[in-house]
Amino acid sequence: MPLHWVAVYGSEPGEHLEQYNADGSLNRYADIDRERLREFTLLHTSTLPPEPNQSAFVFSVVLRPGKRLIYRRRVQKHSSGAETIWHIVGWQENVRGRNVQSVAWVHDNGVPIILRGGFSSDALFSPPVVHPNEGESGMEFVEDE
């Protein structure tokens, strides 16, 4: 199984939203309560013996007050027909009128993890386009300077 996310709101049991529920139903990215969000974690679930369905921690972003979540799933299509999936995860905040970001690219199998200060003009590392249904109105992504 590829990576999946968990949105953590607090430290008490049940104070989180998982991308996949126990019954297999899906929670959408837009379902995340950004006002309460304190941590965003990526997990990898093994489908192989000896421990199928065992989740392993891959990457986490702690969101202190003032920081906003950045998350996208980017699919690279290769001429061979194969696909490479990257999860772009990090935070954004405005500091004294300046847009500050920290962003990591996490491969769908959990490695490698590429940590960058922000986005660049390179195709893989370019800023995402914000969709109005993602609950991120006013979010601005900028390239590294």
Image (cartoon, grey):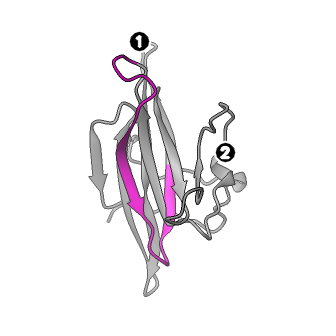
Q: Residue furthest right?
A: 133
Q: Position of residue 107 (x, y in %)?
A: 36, 36
The amino acid marked with disc number 2 is Arg
Q: Residue furthest top?
A: 80
Q: Is residue 1 depicted above or below 16 in this figure?
A: above
Query: Neighbour class for label 2 at 10 Å: few (<14), some, many (≥20)?
Result: few
Residue 119 is at least partly visible in this image: no
Give the residue number, with chain letter if any, for mark 1: 80
User: Between 111 and 114, which is closer to the camera in this rendering?
Assistant: 111
The amino acid marked with disc number 1 is Ser
Name which residue lies at 68% across and 59% down: 135
What span is in magenta? 48-71
Find out whether residue 10 is within the magenta segment. no
Name which residue lies at 41% across and 31% down: 54
Lateral position of residue 131 relative to residue 121, left or right: right
Lateral position of residue 2 relative to residue 31, left or right: left
Name which residue lies at 47% across and 26% down: 1
Give the number of callouts: 2
Secondary element under disc 2, as helix, strand or loop, is loop
Dot label at residue 28: 2
